[in-house]
Image (cartoon, coloured by chain):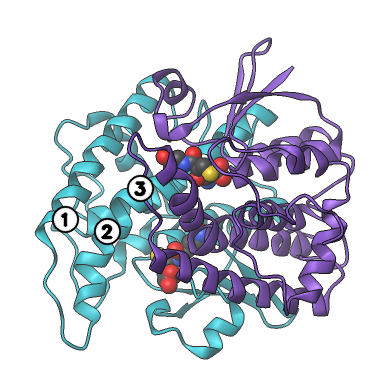
Chain colours: A cyan, B purple
């Protein structure tokens, strides 16, 4: 049985969980707080980051969310989530990288830092209002881009549902939990996100809570 | 004919060029300075980053070095650079991500910023001594890790030559150009890097110069 080292609001672990859910791969959650830099965890992943997956029976250790997704895409072929022609697959991977790096650096990372990490300190610090404002402004720019994509395509990366939808939903769900998304004026993305939320792969994520901070009121509503 | 938008010291473009060289794919270089945020370039890649590849005849645009490498790995099968079992391929991708993000964020990015970007300003700024010192200290830690890997394996990701070697060499070559690597005490990595430097795919990179800053004296010597 695979074990997944993660914490409830890690967007990269969420991307992996959505993919495992879609493919019907079973796994066990192991709670890890990477900011504690536990020796045993650093031994599994010198980068000290979640997600990490471990299969004890085979002694396999998988590190890095994209390496993990590619692994399960290669070993569990249905449904394919990096699909289509080579050019279409490149477009899926471009957008996965867009959400994993641009969206995370501009929005999810700063919000997690201000609203979650700062509360975990021995002496909790207050969020920096300017940093929060900038992250929420960046969120609007990013949702304008997903609106634009969904104006031209059925799904984030093209005509079919793909890992790019999961990567986008993983980041957006964490930001929505943290109250960082203003859904007004983003109908295209809101409609797409409602569809994602009602998928069985999404349900376990919506039910989970991070102890130090509760979700925005509408967070778990499929119809918001 | 593919065109590759890049500048001589972009490590991600170097990774792509090494892979194209190993696979014998022809391409044309197009000089791009992403920090100028040219409208036409932002239109190709909203992230505003190099590398980007364009094939005009087919209207294909590929963005993000890893999406580009996966594309050519899928479409040009020999030699395979993401090879072996699914677990071995996951290890290759883990290390590619390690060099593209950890090594880049700790070492290459700060050095490029201090030694190159600051000189490109209308009023060139002097490098920050503390930032340079930290980047060079981080470089030592990273080379300790590659030494450790190469103590246990023939190549960076395992028994065979792979994209992980190219990703590592791409970052290291830029840092070496900028004089940020102290080779003393890193015999394993130095020997491996000498081997890489003498590959035909590496030669064009060693001959190129960035106008604003010359390379360290030993940079292009295969036997240093
Ligand atoms: N490229 C990595 C990024 C993972 C990542 O940034 N994880 C965060 C949690 S959301 C983390 O562990 N941060 C702790 C740290 O960087 O020290 C992936 O896709 O798996
Ligand atoms: N994940 C991207 C990273 C590319 C990247 O960071 N490129 C740098 C040049 S080395 C860049 O264009 N920076 C300009 C910017 O971020 O505005 C890839 O692998 O292609």
**Which residue appears at 37% of the width and 27% of the height?**
A150
**Residue indicated by mark 1:** A132
Q: CA distance from mark 3 to mark 1?
A: 30 Å
The N terminus of chain A: image quadrant: bottom right
Instruction: Tell me if mark 2 has few (under 14), some (14-19) or many (20+) residues whose alpha carbon lies within 10 angstroms of its own.
Output: many
User: Percent x, y for residue A70?
Assistant: 65, 53
State the mark number for residue B125: 3
Tags 1 and 2 touching, CB below 8 Å:
yes
Residue placed most toward the observer, B186 or A86? B186
Chain letter of the residue carrying label 1: A
Chain letter of the residue carrying label 3: B
Ligand 2 under 8 Å from disc 3 Cβ = no
**Residue indicated by mark 2:** A110
**Which residue appears at 64% of the width and 69% of the height?**
A62
**Which residue appears at 51% of the width and 68% of the height?**
A51
First-in-chain label (1 vs 2): 2
Describe residue B154's horizontal placement relative to residue A166 as left or right. right
- Where residue A186 sits, quadrant-wise, is top left
Instruction: Tell me if mark 3 has few (under 14), some (14-19) or many (20+) residues whose alpha carbon lies within 10 angstroms of its own.
Output: few
Q: Quadrant of ligand 1?
A: bottom left
**Which residue appears at 64% of the width and 12% of the height?**
B56
Residue placed most toward the observer, A13 or B203? B203
């Amino acid at each position: 049985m695979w074990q997944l080292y993660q914490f409830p609001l890690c967007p990269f672990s969420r991307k992996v969980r959505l993919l495992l859910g879609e493919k019907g791969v079973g796994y066990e959650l192991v709670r890890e707080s990477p900011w504690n830099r536990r020796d045993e965890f650093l031994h599994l992943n010198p980068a000290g980051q979640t997600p990490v997956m471990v299969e004890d029976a085979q002694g396999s250790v998988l590190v890095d969310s994209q390496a993990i997704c590619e692994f399960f895409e290669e070993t569990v072929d249905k449904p394919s989530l990096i699909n289509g022609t080579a050019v279409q697959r490149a477009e899926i991977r471009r957008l996965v990288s867009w959400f994993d790096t641009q969206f995370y650096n501009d929005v999810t990372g700063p919000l997690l830092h201000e609203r979650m990490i700062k509360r975990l300190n021995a002496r909790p610090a207050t969020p920096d209002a300017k940093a929060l404002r900038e992250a929420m402004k960046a969120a609007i720019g990013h949702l304008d881009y997903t609106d634009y994509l969904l104006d031209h395509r059925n799904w984030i990366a093209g005509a079919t549902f793909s890992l790019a939808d999961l990567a986008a939903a993983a980041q957006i769900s964490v930001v929505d939990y943290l109250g960082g998304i203003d859904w007004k004026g983003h109908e295209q993305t809101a409609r797409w996100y409602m569809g994602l939320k009602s998928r069985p792969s999404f349900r376990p994520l919506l039910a989970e809570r991070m102890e130090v901070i509760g979700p925005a009121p509408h967070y778990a509503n499929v119809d918001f």
